[in-house]
Amino acid sequence: MRRPFPARPRAGHAVPRRRHAASATWEVRTFVLVSAAICAVFLLVVLYLSQATTVATRGYETQSLERTRDELRRQNALLEVESARLDSPARIEAEAKRLGLVRAAAVPVVQAEPIAAKR
Amino acid sequence: MTERISPNRLRVLFALFAAATLLLSLRVGYWQTIGRTALLGAATDQLRSELVVEAQRGVIRDRSGAILATTVDLRSLYAIPKRIADHADAAAKLAPILATPAATIRAALDSGAEWLYLKRRLPEPVARAVEALAISGLGFEPEPKRLYPNDTLAAHLLGFVNDDGVGQYGVEGVYDRVLRGVPGSLVVERDPKDRELAVGLRTAVPPKNGADLVLTIDLVVQTAAERELRRAVEREKATSGSIIVLDPRDGAILALASSPTFDPARVVAADPEALRDRAVSWTYEPGSTMKAVTIAAGIDTHVVTPTTTYDDKGYAIIGGRRLNNAQGKVYGTTTVTQILERSANAGAVFVGSKLGQDPLYQYLRAFGFGTATGIDLAAEASGAVRPLAEWYPVDVGTIAFGQGIAVTPLQLAMAYAAIANGGTLYRPYVVAATRDADGEHRTAPAAIRSPISRDTADTLRAMLVSAVDRGISHGASLTGYSVAGKTGTAQIPSDDGRYVDDAYISSFAGFAPASDPRFVVVIVLERPQRKLLGTTTAMDAFHELAIDLLRNARIQPDRP
């Protein structure tokens, strides 16, 4: 008894379909991979640019703060000079004179030893 | 119908394209190889800026820390005339603020310059007022300016800084290298708006700022000294004057005043003669203040004692010359102590004669006369003590009472300090310490030598107290305190070797409290109008100054 031949797949049907499916999967994978790579590169570039921009912005802010610091230091130095000018004994003496104050004619000095002895 | 393109045309087009590509490639290749350096240099020049970062000049302070001199960046006003819309309007607005005629400002703006300073180093209120005008085309640039908060105070001692930032005269001159520091550098890359690139190149060598100086000067004492000098000079209409206050225990200068004076912040306007420090750079014949030195030498060599007597006839004859007492006074029998009390020239000649030329010369040199003291101030004069070989016989007499010898007020002060401190001659100094990044470095007092013994110094101190208590120096006495001192009146030598008629230099040298001297004061007035009575004014100045010094230092009275 002859065994029946297995049914031959019909040309252009089952095998092309599988091949087509395999090809489609490869294309999809490739597309996805390439897309992912492009996205990754894009994201990396964006990340880099974002960081570079942030650093540049911070740099400008730092410079601005440094300028502010320098100006404050300058103002502080000017105030120190003004303070020294106001503390000048010559100015104080002149101001006291203008207010009608006079130098003490005599300054009594208390001897420390007698006080200590009394105690 | 489609027209076919000729293959030849395509070949030509291709050939042209290929040639252009080749040329461009060659050009690019050139710039990448041969022209790379030039291109890179040009790009770097645009991008990179190299700056010198100036070091901050050190601050000068007094012994208690008060600022005497400091450097602050003040704003200089510049203009870019092309950017100023209306020159006339801008000039009119600026004129009252800058205290400059509008026409002058207008002329500067119309001069055709692209960029110019209108006024440099403006006081801050003026800069703010200009800023408030918000005139387009005006801008500010910081420039360092040396400021002296006490104006003319201690001007000779401090010196000044010129427009190039170089210190001259005084402490500024001597310590210029210490104060100036070492400039640094900064290399950065900048964007087109001249802002520093945060991610660019940055190479910085930080500047080493100048050291701060702490002086031995006491601002209160200096103020008092200048006040008394000003009063004395005005009262006597003296041509010049000076006051030195120093601590005899170590040679530290507490105050140094000189008249005429100048404003160190406006040296350009100063009279050149005013720049001369009369206390350090000027010499004079000291007159009778020198008698203390002569007698110190006589006592130290035991040729006389305080009680040794001589017969004062009103004059002394030596080397064939007659040397008179002042105003021809005759004192009769006089002790050596009374020589100081009465300031008898004949007495000084007596001691000088007993001493002899060589010992007198040696003692003068030992006390530091004829040699610069070595103080850390610019342009110190050394005075003049003629070599012994050049002495005439009369010189031992004249030099004994302070004529025929030239000293600086500072030298005289140091000699009196040696008498006050028990016989040690110190090197005077004005910088007590330098402060830099490594910390504070204090100046150690330097004893040079001992010209006289302690016994001699103690004896002379008592004799000088007697000169104030009972003698012609009584005007310098103080209630509650013992004062030692001696007046001096000297003639002024002229260029022809004679003395100028009716012109004198009056002085007083003294210290207090005599029991434990805390300060030596020397006051010198040149050509006082009251002539021989100029010493009275010098003593008055000492009296007033000493009261301030004793109060300021809280020194207890040593007398009931």
Image (spheres, coloured by chain):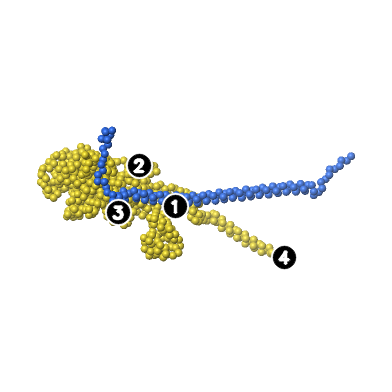
Q: Position of residue B240 (x, y in %)?
A: 24, 53
Q: Position of residue B288 (x, y in %)?
A: 18, 47
Residue B54 or residue A58, whichever sits in front? A58
What subunit carries mark 1? B
Q: Position of residue B60 (x, y in %)?
A: 34, 47
- Residue drawn at (22%, 37%) of the image: B454
* 2 or 1: tag closer to the N-terminus: 1
User: Is residue B443 in view?
Assistant: yes
- Residue drawn at (66%, 64%) of the image: B9
Give the colour in which the image draws chain B. yellow
Q: Which dot, 3 or 4, sits closer to the camera? A: 3
Q: Which residue has dot 4 on it?
A: B2
- Residue drawn at (40%, 55%) of the image: B75
Q: Amino acid at mark 1?
A: Leu
Examine the rendered structure and indicate whether residue B63 appears above or below residue B531.
above
The local secondary structure at tag 2 comes to: strand
Q: Are marks 3 and 4 on the same chain?
A: yes
Disc 1 versus disc 4: distance between alpha carbons? 70 Å
Disc 1 versus disc 3: distance between alpha carbons? 36 Å
Residue B118 or residue B194, whichever sits in front? B118
Q: Which residue has dot 3 on it?
A: B262
Q: Position of residue A104 (x, y in %)?
A: 26, 46
Q: Quadrant of residue B130?
A: bottom left
Q: Amino acid at mark 4?
A: Thr
Instruction: Give neighbour class at mark 3: few <14, some 14-19, many 20+ (Cα, 10 Å).
Output: many
Residue A37 or residue B468, whichever sits in front? B468
Q: Are marks 1 and 4 in contact (CB under 8 Å)?
A: no
* Quadrant occupied by the N terminus of chain A: top right
Q: Are marks 4 and 2 in contact (CB under 8 Å)?
A: no
Q: Which residue has dot 1 on it?
A: B51
Q: Are marks 2 and 1 on the same chain?
A: yes
Disc 4 versus disc 2: distance between alpha carbons? 100 Å
